Structures are given as C-alpha cells and as structure tokens.
Amino acid sequence: MAETRPGGRTARTRAAVHNAVRELFAEGQDQPSVREVSERSGVHEVTIYRRWGRIESLVLDVAVTQLNEEAPFPDSGDLRRDLLDWAHAVAGQVKTREGFALFRALAAATSPLGGGQSGPAAADAAGYLRQRTAQMQRALDRVAAAGGTPPTVAHVFDVVLAPIYLRAIFGYEPPDTDLDALVDRALGTS
C-alpha cells in the first residue's frame, strides 16, 4: 500500500474520502463520481484526483483497505476453524451492497478481462492478493509440518472462495451450513 503518515492531514483526508465512498455504495451508488465523493467528504476534487487519479483507483483503494481491515485471514492454529471464520467474513461482506461493490472493483482491477488497472491502487490490489495468499499459505504450511496433507491455496480459492463470489454475483444466498460443506470439501473431509 502507499505509505501514509499514521496521523495528520493526509490520514484525515484519506479517511474522509474512504468514508464517503463507503456511504455512497451503502446508499446504492454503483459507481460514485469524484464530484459526489468530494461533496460527501468535504475534500476538494483536485485533492482526490491528485491522490487517486481516477474514481476506479479510489474505489480499489477503499476495497483493498476494507478487506485488510475487516476480513483478515484468521490464524488460530485450527485450519478448519480459520477457513470457516474467513469464509463467513467474506460471505458476510459480499452480501452487503457496499461489500459487493468493493468486490467488483477488486475483481475488475485484477482481472485481465476487467481491463486491469495500473498505478498505485492496482499495485495495492496485487499486494493485497499476495499478502492474503501468503497468510493462507503459512497456515497450510503449519498443517504440512505437523504431518498433515493440506490443500493448496488455489484449491481453497476454487472450492471455498469461488462459490461464495459466484453466489453473490447471482444473488443466491446459501445457508451458513453450505460454508461448512465447502470448507470440508476443500480440506478433503467430506
């Protein structure tokens, strides 16, 4: 992520702009404009353009920040429990209008089909994905070191994460017990 001071005007500006984007998404905006974000946050449009360049980069920055803050990969030492907690957090996020809009921004920025982005926000998204993969890999490595046979990160993404996102795209909300079944399938216990 781009380096920012922990306090001061830069941090306050970033927080105000991020809050404005989240509020606009929560109110049903599919793609807020820089003008709307400026009016809502009280931050001048020029400042927003100078910091983020374009609205897509700003939305991506908000998405990556939210995912890092609100859905970190748990690390309790119990892989099944950690995967379940993570799956529930992800499923809960994409069930909200705001969370789904941020998911779409992240998906568009990182997908070659979505046109991909470049610049600091795209680097943040790639960094977020590397960080999340590394967090999960550490948990899987601990299982392997203890003599277990864990799945690969890609398998967890395919079996647990992909169905959550696919269901969100099509508006299908499964019962929470389906997440247990997905995790058990990924772990080879079902």
Image (cartoon, rainbow, N blue to C red):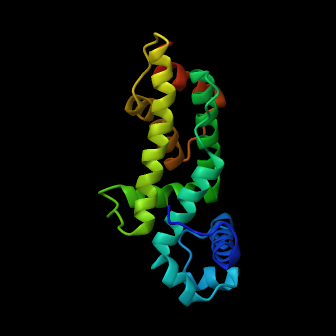
Classify residue 111 as left or right of residue 38: left
Q: Residue at x 45, y 30 (%)?
A: 156
Residue 61 visible in the snapshot: yes
* Residue 155 spot, x, y in % from top left: 39, 29
Q: Residue 74 is drawn in which quadrant?
A: top right
* Along the viewing direction, whichever of 14 and 60 lies nearer the viewer: 14
- Residue at the outermost left position: 112
Q: Is residue 160 visible?
A: no
**Residue lying at the far top of the rendered structure:** 147
Total marks drawn?
0
Q: Position of residue 142 (x, y in %)?
A: 50, 21
Residue, x 63% and y 76% (percent of image)?
Answer: 10
Q: Residue at x 50, y 83 (%)?
A: 49
Above or below for 61 versus 133: below
Front position in the image: 119 or 59: 119
- The picture quadrant where one finds residue 66 is bottom right
Q: Position of residue 21 (x, y in %)?
A: 62, 70
User: Where residue 153 sits: x, y (%)?
Assistant: 41, 32
Image vertical order of residue 59 relative to residue 148, above or below: below
Q: Residue at x 65, y 49 (%)?
A: 70
